[in-house]
């Protein structure tokens, strides 16, 4: 036997046997799950033995929705996340501009006007004086709105006469008609003017992201990106440098190129494979573009933005099904959720498919109508959600959707009790990648600081076991790897996350400060916290 973890608490994720004391590994797979005596007797002099008293071992945690390479890339951008005023953002941007060459694009991320003292959306005028020689592009926290300066607008040829893009919107000064510097769902207008990102750049970003992901206990990630990022990851995999498992979601417009390259659903390796296509039904809460059945409370003229209407969604689903894959559709508002279920149902009916023939997913599902719950069950659609969003959005959701409507927002227990498969992720880089924050949010319905007191609609909170399952068993299943991943079971891959303390015995308020002790993939320790922490390695 190659590896043994002893004297610990193991949450296996198996319904019939959820707990164990020890686990043994051979050739990258779980050989035995049991008590210390049962595992110790199989150890030999060559076995790597770890005594882990007081720790908690869980199946390797899988982030069910992130943007892996972009997360690594964003770590090198101007960081505006968490700042509480426009002036703080301006100062951070000013410093970045002072370090840039003339003409060089300066890109930032993470601003959120709802957290600023000024409580207003910024404009190009808030940037123009900072960078007279540099185009600036600042990406909002949700990734759906851009804040740019005049030079960036000039570089992209966006004037008062420029039409809105087919899907997005160019905000304009109400008096002059000039672009205000705020653009919604419009990053495509700038993409070809930004510095080209090479394959080597993406590889570097992926390795940066991998180091961060392993440190927080992730053994796998579902990454929603495109073909250039997939090809960079594939090269890292061939080079033996990809340690974490990546289930890569692509876009329907890339299917023709994928077919030329022989890339089909399920194809890949134990580290990298594909199967789902990422689609979009609407925008976001913070940008006011999440598609709603009823108007926004703070803007009665607005019901959000349909990125694709039902028939266009249906056509993309047809393309995906023809490829042999499944769909993962971005749907934040309740009307977007309705549209997605209608489109999936339409295409399934056209093809005479059994109701649960596919493992389709809706991403985010931040607001839904109770009338749509039967549709999830009938179609076997997974709700792929990000618990940490609730901790950053609850006040904003009440402002924009109203408290009464929020009874159906981030309603995870309602989904589970309706039989909907529930998968958790982070949406990194748009929120924190560490799953401990998602676990804490899912169980307590509070921020790490304990707000709101008692939890936001606490009846929608989950048990810790349910939350861990949503980070392990379910994302293994949606990625068609349930026979290999998702539980600590004999014959499955030996992927484990080891916490320094037992979360089941620890007050929830202490979870966010609880470190990951070790991250293990295929029985190999790919991350270990600093030495001198009491772990005994025999």
Image (tube, rainbow, N blue to C red):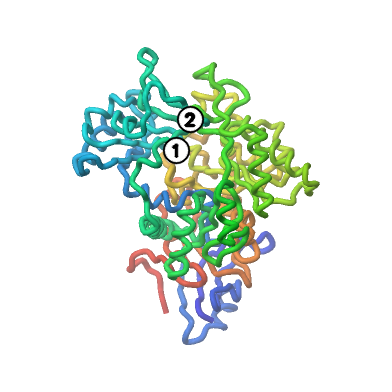
Which residue was labeled with disc 2? Answer: 165
What residue appears at the point 49 percent right and 27 percent down from the top-left corner?
A: 288
Q: Work out whether 68 lies above or below 113.
A: below
Q: Position of residue 357 (x, y in %)?
A: 74, 51
Residue sticking out furthest to the left: 98
- Reading the chain from its start, which is encountered first: label 2 or label 1? 2
Most foreground residue, 390 or 11? 390
**Residue 87, located in which quarter of the rendered image?**
top left
**Residue 120 visible:** no
Q: Quadrant of the N terminus?
A: bottom right
The quarter of the picture where the C terminus appears is bottom left
**Crowdedness near tag 1: few (<14), some (14–19) or many (≥20) residues, C-alpha within 10 Å:** few
Q: Can residue 363 be seen?
A: yes
Give the Cα distance between marks 2 and 1: 9 Å
Q: Tell me: residue 101, above or below residue 123.
A: below
The reply to whether discs 2 and 1 touch (Cβ–Cβ < 8 Å) is yes
Q: Is residue 42 left or right of residue 185?
A: right
Number of labels in the image equals 2
Q: Which residue lies most toward the bottom here?
A: 45
**Element assignment for label 2:** loop
Q: Which residue is mark 1?
A: 188
Q: Which residue lies at the image location 39% right of the left edge and 14% below the top edge?
A: 174
- Give residue 9's position: percent from left, percent from top: 53, 64
Q: Pick the residue in front: 363 or 538.
A: 363
């Amino acid at each position: 036997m190659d590896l043994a973890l002893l004297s610990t608490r193991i949450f296996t994720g198996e319904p019939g046997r959820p707990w164990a004391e020890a686990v043994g590994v051979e050739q990258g797979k779980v050989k035995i799950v049991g008590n210390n005596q049962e595992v110790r007797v199989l150890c030999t002099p060559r076995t790597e033995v770890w005594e882990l008293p007081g720790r908690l071992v869980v199946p390797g945690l899988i982030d069910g929705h992130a943007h892996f390479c972009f997360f690594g890339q964003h770590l090198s951008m101007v960081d505006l996340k968490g700042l509480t005023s426009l002036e703080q953002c301006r100062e951070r941007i000013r410093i970045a501009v002072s370090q840039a060459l003339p003409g060089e694009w300066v890109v930032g991320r993470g601003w959120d006007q709802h957290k600023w003292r000024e409580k207003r959306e910024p404009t190009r005028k808030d940037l123009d004086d900072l960078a007279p020689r540099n185009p600036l592009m600042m990406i909002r926290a949700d990734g759906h709105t851009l804040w740019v300066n005049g030079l960036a607008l000039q570089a992209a040829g966006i004037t008062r006469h420029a039409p809105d893009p087919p899907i997005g919107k160019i905000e304009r000064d109400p008096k002059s008609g000039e672009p205000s510097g705020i653009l919604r769902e419009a990053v495509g207008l700038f993409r070809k003017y930004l510095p080209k990102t090479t394959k080597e750049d993406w590889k570097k970003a992926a390795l940066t992201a991998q180091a961060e992901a392993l440190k927080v206990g992730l053994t796998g990630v579902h990454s929603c990106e495109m073909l250039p990022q997939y090809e960079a990851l594939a090269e890292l995999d061939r080079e033996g440098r990809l340690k974490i498992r990546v289930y890569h979601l692509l876009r329907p417009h890339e299917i023709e190129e994928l077919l030329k390259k022989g890339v089909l659903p399920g194809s890949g390796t134990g580290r990298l494979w594909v199967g789902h296509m990422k689609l979009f039904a609407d925008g976001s809460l913070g940008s006011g573009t999440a598609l709603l059945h009823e108007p926004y409370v703070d803007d009665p003229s607005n019901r959000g933005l349909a990125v694709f209407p039902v028939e266009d969604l249906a056509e993309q689903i047809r393309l995906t099904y023809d490829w042999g894959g499944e769909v993962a559709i971005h749907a934040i508002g309740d009307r977007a959720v309705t549209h997605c279920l209608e489109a999936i149902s339409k295409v399934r009916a056209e093809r005479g498919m059994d109701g649960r023939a596919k493992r389709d997913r809706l991403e985010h599902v931040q607001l839904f109508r109770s009338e749509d719950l039967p549709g999830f069950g009938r179609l076997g659609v997974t709700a792929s959600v990000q618990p940490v969003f609730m901790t950053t959005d609850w006040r904003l959701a009440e402002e924009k959707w109203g408290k009464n409507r929020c009874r159906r927002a981030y309603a995870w227990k309602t989904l589970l009790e309706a039989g909907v498969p529930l998968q958790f992720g982070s949406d990194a880089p748009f929120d924190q990648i560490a799953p401990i924050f998602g676990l804490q949010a899912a169980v307590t319905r509070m921020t790490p600081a304990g707000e709101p007191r008692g939890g936001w609609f606490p009846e929608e909170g989950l048990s810790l076991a349910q939350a861990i399952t949503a980070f392990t068993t379910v994302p293994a299943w949606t990625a068609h790897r349930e026979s290999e991943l998702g539980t600590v079971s004999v014959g499955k891959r030996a992927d484990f996350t080891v916490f320094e303390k037992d979360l089941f015995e620890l007050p929830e308020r202490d979870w966010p400060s609880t470190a990951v002790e070790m991250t293990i993939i295929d029985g190999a320790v790919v991350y270990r916290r600093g030495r001198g922490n009491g772990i005994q390695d025999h």
